[in-house]
Image (tube, rainbow, N blue to C red):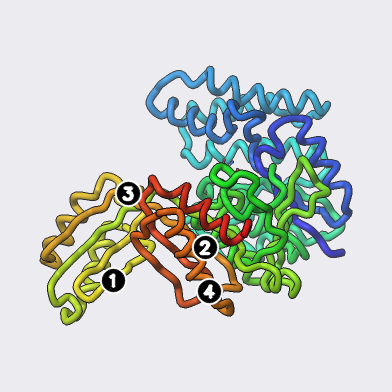
Amino acid sequence: MSRIVCKFGGTSLADALQFKKVRAIVEADQRRTIVVPSAPGKRMASDAKLTDLLYLCQQSASVGSDFTPVFARVSERFLEIEQALGLKAGMADHLDQLHKTIIRGVSKDHIASRGEYLNGLLMAAYLGAEFIDPQECILLNANGGVHPDTYRMLGERLANTNKRYVIPGFYGRDANGHIKTFSRGGSDISGAIVARAAQAELYENWTDVSGLLMADPRVVANAKPMEEATYAEIRELSYMGATVLHDEAISPVREVGIPIAIKNTNAPDHPGTRIVNKLSPEIDKSTEIAGIAGKKNFVMINIEKNLMNKEVGFAFRLFGVLERHGVSFEHCPSAIDSMSVIVEASQLEGKTEVVLEEIRNTLNPDRLELEPQIALIAVVGEGMAKTIGIAAKVFVALREAQVNVRLINQGASELNIIVGVMPEDYETALRALYGVFVND
Ligand code: ASP
């Protein structure tokens, strides 16, 4: 039988009521045999995510502070779900064990992973499914990526297509067998890995919005949902700040062509967004762009040197400095005698001065300056490559909104046009671009 892997995010599993919705969704389609849960998320805006509480416990314990009050909040959430659903999943014992583990002092990853682990035990008991601990069969590399052996190990573990399985998100193990988590929001990655290992026909990612929106709703009121988008478009958009899906969750399924559906646990009948390899012809014809996304926290290092264009290896030495300091860069616009590097501000945290100093010593520039704040906005769409006038539209919209463009970048793939603006112009620019492409 063909299978669907369903990953449920934190808000979809925040309390017993949400668990009930999840069970109804799973039972509504018999192909939904594999469930990947996150840890309980926020029940309301002022609430805490369970994973954050666990990090807090670990942090307090590591400096010898009393973590009992925070741990009580963790316990309360799990016990409440167990009780309200009438389950006997042994939560009290598991929590007792976790408490001891924190006192004993295990790794941050180990403690953070327990949100998913315990929620997985509850979900398995609730669905009458077999529980699989990802520590057994999801192997992570030292850099946090998935080890290719995972697909075989996990595939064997999930072999029975008639069975229902629950496998928690967010973690696996490292080469030494210790628990290792993905980066934050990483249950999306787990879901994609599980979908690939199970050779699923579809990876459903259940969240609290009805699909991906064409722009950040905090900036553009009533931003429209996307019906369909390609893997490449979503990767660009999520990398540039669209927050619904982790940007590393695409590759595992993209490589084998498993489509993703972004769905809303609170409105399961809404079609949501389908992420595919190639757009269907109607969508392809009717949409100019997939969406617009952006982020504010970039810095720009500007380097000027007379006759830079003649100096062989200039860029090589510049990138060498960045590499030595573990700084990854985003874009590198250049002119004959100048070059800029755009870097996410967090990349330079605590090392700005050292990096600048080394650039100065290595390249001996005539001028070196740091622009401490720049915002990037990406207009993304596969259709761009074959449509004339997209760039014209972008720049007319920005001129009409009186936004000064600090940098322009378009990759060879013609999947996006990226503009850099001052952070104070970010919202205006985003709305102007949305207006011209979507509400025209
Ligand atoms: N619970 C983890 C986090 O808060 C992983 C996830 O929800 O995807 O980041």
| Residue 135 visible within the image | no
Place of residue 261 in the rendered image (x, y in percent of width and height, measured from the top left)? 72, 57
Q: Which amino acid does label 1 sit on?
A: Ser
Report helix, strand or loop for mark 3.
strand
- Mark 2 or mark 3, which has the lower sequence index? 3
* First reached walking from the N terminus: tag 2 or tag 4: 2
Give the residue at x 63% y 49%. Answer: 223
C-beta proximity under 8 Å, tags 1 and 3: no
Is the CB of mark 2 within 8 Å of ligand 1?
Answer: no
Gap in Å between the C-alphas at discs 4 and 1?
24 Å
Characterize the local packing of mark 3: few (<14), some (14-19) or many (20 or more) Cα atoms within 10 angstroms: some
| Residue at which label 3 appears | 373
Q: What element carries label 4?
A: loop
Which of pointers 2 and 4 indicates the residue nearer the eye? Answer: 4
State yes or no: discs 3 and 4 in contact (Cβ < 8 Å): no
* Residue type indicated by callout 3: Gln
Mark nearest the camera among 3 and 4 is 4
30 relative to 148, above or below:
above
Q: Which mark is residue 389?
A: 4
> Sequence-wise, which precedes: disc 1 or disc 2?
1
Circle count: 4
- Neighbour tally class for label 1: few under 14, some 14-19, many 20 plus, Cα within 10 Å: some
Where residue 431 sits: x, y (%)? Answer: 53, 51
Residue 369: image quadrant is: bottom left
Q: In which quarter of the image is the C terminus?
A: bottom right
Give me the C-alpha separation between circle 1 and circle 3.
18 Å
Disc on res. 334 = 1
Residue name at image x 21 percent, y 77 percent? 313
Please report whichever mark, 3 or 4, sits nearer to the chain's N-terminal start: 3
